[in-house]
Image (cartoon, rainbow, N blue to C red):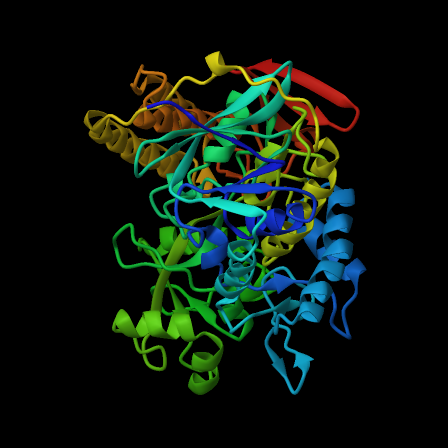
Amino acid sequence: MPFEIFDFDFVVVGSGLAGLNAAVKASEYGRVAVVTKGKLNESSSFNAQGGIAVAIGEKDNPKNHIKDTLMAGRGLCDPEAVKMLVVQGREDVNALIREGLTFDNRDGKLLFSLEGGHSTNRVIHLNGANTGKYITLYFAERVNNNPRIKIFENTFATGLLKQNGKVIGLKALNLLDEQNIAFYSPAVILASGGYSRIYERSTNPDTSTGDGVWLAAEAGTEIRDIEFIQFHPTAFYDGTKFTFLISEAVRGEGGLLLNSNLERFMPRYDEMNELAPRDIVAKAILSEMKKTRKDFVYLDLRHLNAKLFKEKFSNIANFLNTASIDFTKDLIPVAPAAHYTMGGIKTDLDGATNIPGLFACGECASTGVHGANRLASNSLLECLVFSERAVEKAKNLIGSKIEKCEKDLSPVFISSTMHDAYETLKIKVAELLTKSANILRKGENLKEALKEVKELKVGTTLDEYYSIKARSLKKLASMILKAAELREESCGAHQRDDFKQTRAEFEGHFTFKENEIYFERENEQESRLLN
């Protein structure tokens, strides 16, 4: 089947908040394609229970928000990126309020929640713990009703089109009718989400498999901080690989953590108790699990006001009810699960990568905002701020000359006989990452896991769908394991059992480019070959 050819001023890959906002902003300047491998509302943004952290409260200020973000990032944030996030974020959220988006309030006054790592109540919500769902639906409606935006659902991006060192478009495959599509555009914006779903237990949807990161890496883009994976401390645990996120805001309302001996333990680990940054809480839970030889701890909500809880966290209350848990009487078993990925496609403050014509925003991007550990509820704010900045930069490319070359368009096909081999490889990679690159890591385990990943067999057919996904998965896992092995320290979400302390010599970033990995400090680069 021949390629279907389209021309657009912008191509946006992904339909989370970053992708949808990018599409809306880009439509002010030209025609936009939104390419998403699932449905428009299948994203981590849609599932996000946390709200938006923004310093607009009467008792809050940007300096405190910046300070909290830098502290959570453990010295690896880019201060300029953090300042951009906080300052522009205030403007963006206020603009949404002026547009009529009604955040939770009482008598017209915004309600602010407290979450881990924040020094004050700073997090605003939409319909309680449904913020991601409702803000995504708000932007999805704007996208659906915009005649300058064309949506391509169930369409898997298979490769970036390059010419003379520039990205000039995207190749993709419609997964329903197997039609190959070529999108020519002077600006491609990757907003494809993170990669935590490649672990055994993850709070994210099945779509969060790092496709955009792999696409960028294959095209020669720099990939940074990929070893930093945040594990959410309180994912529901039932003894299977199933997870359901119990929002951090629940602990902000007074939820307590107990070990299997029914002892409250967080005061022993941090003065902020249950509201310590996520890396500290997750590590504390792991420690208690080891001490008690159990695979979970408990979240205790029995002392909370049940009526208020059901109003504020209706989706969580409904889930607990379906799981036959009465939170007014029963303890809730929880254990950490892979949640948010701080690393990804390296960009500047305008979302631009090292390849002209290619931009990234949202969770797939490494903007410098999160450092070694994301501050709770900064992610939706990042989606708003950096997607807008990416569009403002990308609009300058409209009208750039593109020479289409048919020989660059090799079609991708789907072979059902490759499905089982891919599923087997996916399960094995998830096992290796969960065992070796989890909350607590050890050099010898990382090295052995990396060796095993490299030995895994993947499809040799370059243009077959499952073979592409297998190569993507193997590439991502290898980068995570290699960077984690080289970072011989404990810092934020990266904790080494054999190097328990933070080390000054690692105050920098491991960055992959093609087949090389190098360590970046300000005004300094050290190259190491990836083997």
Quarter-of-image position of residue 501: top right
Residue 441 x/y as whole percent:
46, 36
Q: Number of labelled discs?
A: 0
Residue closest to the eye, 166 or 483: 166
* Residue at 32%, 23% in the rendered image: 1
Query: Is residue 107 positioned above or below 155 on the image?
Result: below
Residue 421 x/y as whole percent:
23, 27
Query: Is residue 265 positioned above or below 438 on the image?
Result: below
Residue closest to the eye, 234 or 318: 318
* Residue at 68%, 17% in the rendered image: 526
- The answer to whether one can see residue 374 in this image is no
Residue 363 x/y as whole percent:
55, 44
- The answer to whether one can see residue 428 in this image is yes
Q: In this view, does 504 lie to the left or right of 475?
A: right
* Residue at 25%, 33% in the rendered image: 423
Q: In this view, does 163 lie to the left or right of 284?
A: right
Quarter-of-image position of residue 350: top right
Query: Is residue 113 positioned above or below 168 on the image?
Result: below
